[in-house]
Image (cartoon, rainbow, N blue to C red):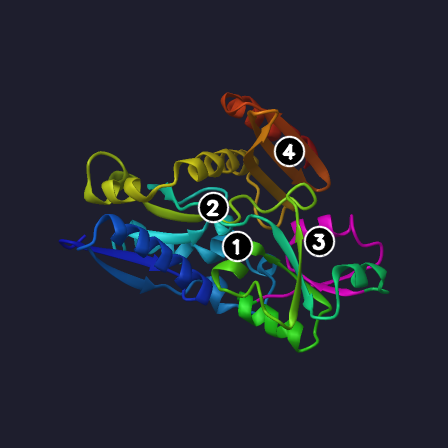
Amino acid sequence: MEDNLIKIGTRGSALALVQTELVISAIQEKYPGINIEKVIIKTKGDKEPDKPVSSFGDKRVFSAEIEEALSNGIIDLAVHSAKDLPSSLKDGLCIPCVLKREDEREVLVTLAGTSYEDLLKADMPVIGTGSLRRRMQLKHFFQNIELKDIRGNVETRINKLRNGGYDGIMLAAAGLKRLGLDREKDLEYKYFSTQDIVPAGGQGIIAVETRKEDASGKSFIGEVVKSINDQETFFHFNNERKIIEALGAGCNTGFGVISYCYVKDKEERLCIRTIIRYHVFNGTGSREDAGRLIEMAIKHGKEGY
């Protein structure tokens, strides 16, 4: 790293750039005089925008080139949508920092005048999603449905909906909100609770990746990432990642997981919920029970394979 300069690697989509700007703003708030350079890296997933990911790889198609640049010292930090991270990182790399979680829910987006209730009554509505996890869970709500693959960034998918290719499309709420696309006048939005549709692990979380050697000790990079880390989100991120890593769960396994806390009878409760091929686990306890709940979720997940 050059003196007072941090190079941050990111994909070039509008959402990736917005998320990178959020990281940059968080750093500059703590270190006003710092210089930050964005390095846009095109991944294999970006080069194949129209093919289903399952046809040419797994989640690594969105991160391999970025991790390679990080390992080789071309960049100092990498910014990812945590839900797009593979089940294991490249050797020598780690995620020491996440920003505060945005809305983790799933959203069905339709054209104005066509509601979720309308689609429930329709004969074989066409819903766009390339996610096995979403496909499996949508079948709980629709008796008759045609599920059609869709690729591209958020704006591209919405335009495909507007052009009549689909009756509805499934998207992550976090991406819509970060891009300011959650209040379009010509669209309607049906938000599903995480009890109704379990999201992808890490959904709504921006993860910052770096080299282990830089994250440890008293290096400047280590100080920077520590200063912007959201501890509450980091707790839930690590819970979800431990389950993902133990199960080797990727985008082709129909797997979802969410860790969150809620208050019941004035007492904080931790909930860890997973789904894998219709096999659902819903465990609750105290925050101190995280390890036990993670072990139970892993055991349950292995039974679901």
- Residue 67 on image: x %, y %: 37, 52
- Left or right of 157, for residue 22: left
Instruction: Inspect the image, locate mark 1, and give the three-letter code of the amino acid beneath it.
Output: Ala
- Left or right of 220, for residue 195: right
CA separation, marks 1 and 3? 19 Å
Q: Which residues are magenta?
A: 125-151
Callout in the foreground (3, 4): 3
Q: Are marks 2 and 1 in contact (CB under 8 Å)?
A: yes
The residue where tag 3 is placed is 135
Which residue in the rendered view is the most extreme toward the bottom?
163
CA separation, marks 1 and 4? 26 Å
Q: Residues within 10 Å of mark 4 (few under 14, many from 20)?
A: many
CA separation, marks 3 and 4? 18 Å
How many circles with numbers are drawn on the protein?
A: 4
Q: Residues within 10 Å of mark 3 (few under 14, many from 20)?
A: many
- Above or below residue 17? Residue 88 is above
Q: Quadrant of residue 118?
A: bottom right
CA separation, marks 2 and 1? 9 Å
- Above or below residue 112? Residue 196 is above
Instruction: Inspect the image, locate mark 4, and give the three-letter code of the amino acid beneath it.
Output: Gly
Q: Residues within 10 Å of mark 2 (few under 14, many from 20)?
A: some
**Residue 67 visible (yes or no):** no
- Residue 301, numbered label: 4
- Label 3 or label 4, whichever comes before in sequence order: 3
CA separation, marks 2 and 4? 24 Å
Instruction: Inspect the image, locate mark 3, and give the three-letter code of the amino acid beneath it.
Output: Arg
**Residue 37 visible (yes or no):** yes
In the rendered structure, does residue 211 fall within the stretch colored magenta? Answer: no
